[in-house]
Image (spheres, rainbow, N blue to C red):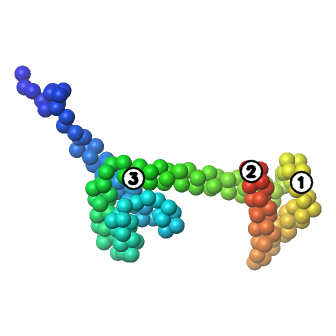
Amino acid sequence: MTRNYTDDPDHDYGPTRSQQRRDALAVLELAGQLVELAPTNLARLELPDDVRDEIANVRRITSHGARKRQLAYLAKLMRNHEGDAFAAVRAALGENRDRQRQEAAALHRLEALRAQLLGTEGDAALTALIADHPALDRQHLRALVRQSRVEQATPNKPPRATRELFQVLKTLDTDTAD
């Protein structure tokens, strides 16, 4: 009977080569996210100084090949640190991504509501909105809806009332969230 290297249960062989590659690609993806992150958000994260300096170097490079090479070097630097060194960074990026999704979904809901107000069934949507928010200035809202419809019908007219309507809906949404 031939013995396989996995037959010895007492010996720790470590992660497989495939797992090592998956881990390295995950660190490379994290490095790419850090490079693309806004400077103000990056400043909030606790990063080692050498990693922070290398992120600045990668941002300065514009050539695709050189940038890719430097990004791989950044990932190598990050792998040299302890495995838990970037756990907080991953958590912060995950929260940031979730918050961005929530904000985008809220904006889409507001745009859909605005489209309903300006659509063919706008009067019913407006009545429902006023019923949901009794403190709302009805005259102002109706005037904005009327002006927005005129703006849509008139080519080359700036959508001032449409933007203002969106802002009113946005303040209603934030008041409801509070």
**Would you name the residue on which mark 3 appears?**
86
Characterize the local packing of mark 3: few (<14), some (14-19) or many (20 or more) Cα atoms within 10 angstroms.
Answer: some
Q: Is residue 143 visible?
A: yes
Counting from the top left corner in percent of width and height, residue 96 is at 54, 54
Tell me the amino acid under the disc marked 1. Ala
Mark nearer the N terminus (2 vs 1): 1
Q: Which residue is farthest top?
A: 1
Mark nearer the N terminus (1 vs 3): 3
Q: Secondary structure at mark 1?
A: loop
**Would you name the residue on which mark 1 appears?**
135
Characterize the local packing of mark 2: few (<14), some (14-19) or many (20 or more) Cα atoms within 10 angstroms.
Answer: few
Say if mark 2 contacts mark 3, CB within 8 Å: no
Counting from the top left corner in percent of width and height, residue 129 is at 84, 51
Tell me the amino acid under the disc marked 3. Phe
**Would you name the residue on which mark 2 appears?**
178
Which circle marks residue 167 in the picture? none
Which sits in the foreground, 97 or 155? 97
Q: CA distance from mark 1 to mark 3?
A: 48 Å
Counting from the top left corner in percent of width and height, residue 70 is at 31, 68
Tell me the amino acid under the disc marked 2. Asp
* Mark 1 or mark 3, whichever is nearer to me: 3
13 vs 33, left or right, is left
Give the residue displayed 74% in from the left and 55% down from the top. 174
Mark nearer the N terminus (2 vs 3): 3
Q: CA distance from mark 2 to mark 3?
A: 33 Å
Which sits in the foreground, 82 or 135? 82
* Mark 2 or mark 1, whichever is nearer to me: 2
Q: CA distance from mark 2 to mark 1?
A: 15 Å
Give the residue displayed 77% in from the left and 54% down from the top. 175
Q: Quadrant of the N terminus?
A: top left
The picture quadrant where one finds residue 170 is: bottom right
Q: Secondary structure at mark 3?
A: helix
